[in-house]
Amino acid sequence: MEQQDKANRHQLIQNWIYQAADHIRSSMQDPLQVSEKTSRKDLVTNMDKETESFLVEKIQQSFPNERILAEESSNQNTQDLNGVVWIIDPIDGTLNFVKQKHDFAIMIAVYEDGIGQMGYIYDVIKDEMYVGIKDQGVKCNQKQLSKVDDTSLAKGLVAISGLLLAEGNEAAKQVAKRSSGVRIVGSAGIETIYAVTGRIVAYVAASLAPWDIAAGKVIAEELGLMYTQQNGEPIQLLKKNPVLIATPSAHKEIFELLQGVSSK
């Protein structure tokens, strides 16, 4: 993808996200239509659907020949990442959005032939736009971010998905014990932001879908973090993955802990 093409897309994508976020914020006091997808902890709202429809329409108008993989759409049977594919999470952290009105994000990624070219995570309430463009680093609200310090597990906080801890996962417990402490946010996008800004040294997630992963992977890797499956294998972007995002040092330590526990 040419640099000028990226620059043109960047302006469009930022504008679309800001417009979508304005609509969400202006509707925060309106009654929500909330439905369960797979359980009472897996929700979808009218705002998820409206935001996704808005973004999909904008992409289709500007890039009619490119494919879109979006969380709430029926086109989730994408078989490959050939060509240009957009991956969208209209509201990442829907449960937070419904219950707390905080800690949720709009996420968009652009992949070309399976390689992440552009990733966007927008914290709607904090008005923080994180943009990662391949080989150009990451910016937050136009300010260039530095590479993340390679902090060890013992010297940093970790985010671990509530599902792993609730189920008493022994490997997750060992990671927690070796760290300085555990934090749970409930949004893959926001927890990825914590990792890329050095607020945590690792994020261990039980199962993330493509739209949970795509934007954050571009951003994290641009800043020197490792973004893999928990077994160290590369992310399979068209499937759900047990994910480990971490500094190189923390990644090595956590990987060894996870493999050691799973082999017993």
Image (cartoon, rainbow, N blue to C red):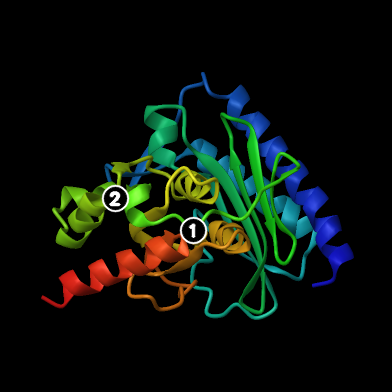
Amino acid found under the numbered disc labelled 2:
Ser
Most foreground residue, 228 or 30: 228
The residue pinned by badge 1 equals 150
Asked whether residue 122 is in view, the answer is yes
**Left or right of 177 on screen, residue 157:** right
Quadrant of res 81: bottom right
Quarter location, residue 182: top left
Label 2: few (<14), some or many (≥20) within 10 Å? many
Residue shown at the point (63%, 36%) measured from the top left: 128
Residue in front for this viewpoint, 7 or 210: 7
From the top left corner, tell me how far across and down residue 13 is, in percent.
Answer: 74, 50
Look at mark 2 in the image and give the residue it sits on.
Answer: 179
Query: Residue at horizontal 41%, vertical 31%?
Result: 98
Q: Are marks 1 and 2 in contact (CB under 8 Å)?
A: no
Q: Position of residue 230 (x, y in %)?
A: 34, 69
Q: Quadrant of the C terminus?
A: bottom left
Residue count near mark 1 (Cα–Cα under 10 Å), binned few <14, some 14–19, many ≥20: some
Q: Quadrant of residue 117?
A: bottom right
Above or below: residue 103 compared with residue 175: above
Split into 4 quadrants, where in the image is the N terminus?
A: bottom right
106 sits to left or right of 243: right
